[in-house]
């Protein structure tokens, strides 16, 4: 039985269970595009969940993930990066810190664009757009946000600055921005990295691990992760940040191409990721071009009773972030996240004059967030703070002075690492998503079955999930939660 047939069978089995229980939630069918697509396992599971549990529980799932589970995702990403870098470096280099990387030596010199793929460093943190990108801005060079630290390092040319102490209590890295090239061929706008004095005699593994620990995936240790990811979600969906920072269409097109490559890598379910993941056909290029026009304007095309453009402005996003940051406890934070997402969903629904469409539009908004959450997290990794650690290790492994030709070539050279980290993020999302599915199925089954019949039914669902490639450790955790 092929993957598509297995998806259809699972849909029909669950539809039968719902019929037995006289469920009145969304109708389940095999009409979803993800059911008929071999490579859309994740999207299929989201579609299955949305049809099974209904709109309210789906919205609650999104709010819960954003409000409670981002620290778990961040920890998994960091530990995954440590393991990947340890494996890569142990196969290629001496575990001791290279002499040229130690403070007082040549260090690693790279163009700003080699760590800042999408011109983050050109946005002033104190500008309206900057407040949506950076955190801990007032501390400037002593910020706990590496991106803020790096911006202010660039504003003070030829002056070495230290990173690490503001977060860990000990400086780890020294950075110097060198604006002017040399007659011997060194280009303009270079960042020079060396270890700090405290790390000059430590091994590479300690440096990597401690540097990764000093970074934050969603802002900084003192900010609320939910605030930062709300901004990232709105940027991905609507271009809320791009429109206010006056990015060029060329830059936005490059970003969208980069995100498409990430999607291709993450959705590849074959053991080998071939080079086709990094190439676009004419229809994809046309789609990216159309989306870049919309994103520059800060709008998104929405099909209702008519085709219309919707947006969530930067001012609205800023207000949402502020409401989350000033919350005094977890309950207030959850309520602020809920209000932020409800407002965004409602603003899209208001674009339709058809009352019957409004609830569908709001539900689809939350479905789209779930489907894009993995990519949003991966985009957070592809910022100067984490690219810096990749770039440093790239030169250590491949030789001082080596680099890559832009962001897509970076992904191409690190495709295994990117997919490995993407799977870690996905497994956490699947764990909670499928937990929701199993709980709903259990509830339905309990209305018609008892005792060992329920257990047999749950075992059967576990088998179907394994057909779809859901990792056994994820299935085991789900069964533990629902037992």
Image (cartoon, grey):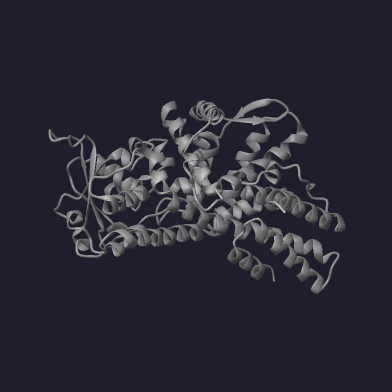
Residue 183 pos. (x, y %): 12, 33
Q: Nearer the viewer, residue 367 or 97?
A: 97
The answer to whether residue 247 of the structure is visible from this angle is no
* Front one among 257 and 438: 257
Residue at position x 66%, y 59% from top? 434
Give me the residue at 77% from left, 66% from top: 457
For the N terminus, the image quarter is bottom right
User: Where does the image place residue 162, in percent across and percent down from the top left?
Assistant: 23, 53
- Rendered view: 451 above or below 251: below
Closer to the camera, 208 or 393? 393
Question: Is 88 on the left-hand or right-hand side of 396?
Answer: right
What percent of the width, then of the height, locates residue 224? Answer: 47, 53
When asked about the image quadrant of residue 172, the answer is bottom left
Residue 467, compared with residue 303, is above or below; it is below
Residue 48 left/right relative to 318 = right
Q: Is residue 345 visible?
A: yes
Q: Is residue 310 above or below residue 30?
A: above
Q: Quadrant of residue 455?
A: bottom right
């Amino acid at each position: 039985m092929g993957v598509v047939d297995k998806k259809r069978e699972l849909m029909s089995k669950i539809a039968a269970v719902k019929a037995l229980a006289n469920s009145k939630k969304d109708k389940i069918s095999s009409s979803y595009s993800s059911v008929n697509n071999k490579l859309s396992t994740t999207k299929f599971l989201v579609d299955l969940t949305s049809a099974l549990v209904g709109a309210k529980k789906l919205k609650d799932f999104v709010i819960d993930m954003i409000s409670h589970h981002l620290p778990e995702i961040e920890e998994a990403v960091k530990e995954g990066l440590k393991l990947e870098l340890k494996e890569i470096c142990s196969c290629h280099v001496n575990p001791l810190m290279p002499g040229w990387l130690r403070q007082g030596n040549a260090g690693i010199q790279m163009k700003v664009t080699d760590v800042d793929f999408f011109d983050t460093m050109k946005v002033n943190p104190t500008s309206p757009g900057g407040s949506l990108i950076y955190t801990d801005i007032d501390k400037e060079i002593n910020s706990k946000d590496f991106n803020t630290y790096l911006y202010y390092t660039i504003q003070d040319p030829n002056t070495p600055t230290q990173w690490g102490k503001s977060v860990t209590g000990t400086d780890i890295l020294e950075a110097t921005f060198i604006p002017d090239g040399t007659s011997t061929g060194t280009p303009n706008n270079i960042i020079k990295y060396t270890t700090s004095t405290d790390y000059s005699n430590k091994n590479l593994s300690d440096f990597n691990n401690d540097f990764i620990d000093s970074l934050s995936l969603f802002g900084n240790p003192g900010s609320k992760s939910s605030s930062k990811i709300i901004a990232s979600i709105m940027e991905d969906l609507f271009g809320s940040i791009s429109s206010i920072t006056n990015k060029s269409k060329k830059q936005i097109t490059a970003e969208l191409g980069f995100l498409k490559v990430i999607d291709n890598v993450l959705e590849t379910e074959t053991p080998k990721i071939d080079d086709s993941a990094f190439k676009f056909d004419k229809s994809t290029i046309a789609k990216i071009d159309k989306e870049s026009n919309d994103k520059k304007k800060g709008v998104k095309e929405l099909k209702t009773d008519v085709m219309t453009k919707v947006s969530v402005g930067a001012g609205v996003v800023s207000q949402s972030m502020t409401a989350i940051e000033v919350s005094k406890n977890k309950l207030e934070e959850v309520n602020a996240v809920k209000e932020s997402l409800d407002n965004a969903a409602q603003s899209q629904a208001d674009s339709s004059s058809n009352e019957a469409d409004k609830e569908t539009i709001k539900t689809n908004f939350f479905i789209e967030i779930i489907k894009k959450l993995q990519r949003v997290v991966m985009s957070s990794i592809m910022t100067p703070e984490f690219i810096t650690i990749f770039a440093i290790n790239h030169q250590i492994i491949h030789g001082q002075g080596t680099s890559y030709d832009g962001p897509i070539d970076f992904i191409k050279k690190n495709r295994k690492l990117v997919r490995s980290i993407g799977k870690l993020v996905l497994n956490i999302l699947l764990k909670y998503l499928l937990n929701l599915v199993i709980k709903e199925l259990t509830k339905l089954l309990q209305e018609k079955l008892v005792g060992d019949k329920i257990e047999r039914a749950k075992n059967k669902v576990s088998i179907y999930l394994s057909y779809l490639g859901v990792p056994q450790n994820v299935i085991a955790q789900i069964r533990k939660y629902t037992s």
